[in-house]
């Protein structure tokens, strides 16, 4: 039979252990991962999209492989949008993703990243 350690949790020990483990948590990627997950949850359900962007088949397959959306894959833009506006991504008349614009609709012809993969969620 193995011995198990029994710890008495008091406000002092809880406080000490919190401050002991906090730097370790901050050094790990867990908090950053949680922030990304919460951001993507907000993009999917809390963000109000400004415009609908229709993409081609190549851009859709790239999105399914966890890539950023490039402006070269855009076929049509519903309305004008600015940097940091919410966008709905449409393929084959279905909303397939949502994201936050990195460039404005006026700059979409410059062949850059329209939505970075950290600001994009596939629905």
Image (spheres, grey):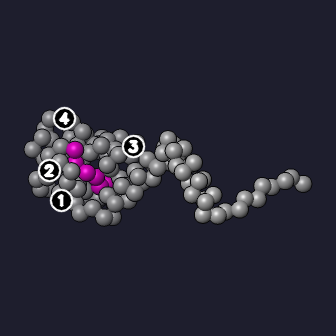
Residue at left 34%, top 44%? 117
Camera-nearest label, 4 or 2: 2
Q: Which residue is mark 4?
A: 111
Point out residue 77 in the picture as x, y percentages from the top left corner.
Answer: 15, 51
Q: CA distance from mark 2 to mark 3?
A: 24 Å
Q: Which residues are magenta?
A: 97-102
Where is residue 24? Give x, y as percent.
54, 44
State which mark lies toward you, 3 or 1: 1
How much space separates mark 1 and mark 4, taking CA atoms? 21 Å
Dominant secondary structure of the residues highlighted in magenta in the image: strand
Could you tell me how far apart the alpha carbons at marks 4 and 2 are, in whole angstroms? 16 Å
Please report contact status of discs 3 and 1: CB closer than 8 Å, yes or no. no
Residue drawn at 28 percent across, 52 percent down: 99
Task: Answer whether labels 4 and 3 touch (C-beta < 8 Å).
Answer: no
Where the C terminus falls, by quadrant?
Answer: bottom left
Of residues 115 and 96, which is closer to you in this image?
A: 115
Which residue is disc 3 drawn over?
A: 66
Residue under pointer 2: 82
Q: Earlier in the sequence, mark 3 or mark 1?
A: 1
| Mark 4–mark 3 distance (CA, rounded to whole Å) | 19 Å
């Amino acid at each position: 039979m193995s011995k198990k350690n029994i710890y008495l949790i008091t406000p002092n020990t809880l406080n000490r252990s919190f401050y002991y483990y906090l730097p370790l948590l901050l050094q790990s990627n867990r908090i950053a991962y949680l922030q990304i997950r919460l951001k993507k949850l907000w993009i999917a359900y809390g963000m109000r999209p400004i415009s609908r962007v229709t993409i081609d088949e190549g851009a859709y397959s790239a999105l399914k492989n966890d890539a950023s959306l490039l402006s070269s894959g855009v076929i049509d833009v519903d309305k004008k949008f600015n940097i940091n506006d919410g966008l709905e991504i449409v393929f084959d008349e279905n909303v397939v993703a949502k994201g936050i614009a990195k460039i404005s609709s006026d700059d979409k012809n410059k062949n850059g990243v329209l939505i970075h993969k950290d600001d994009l969620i596939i629905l």
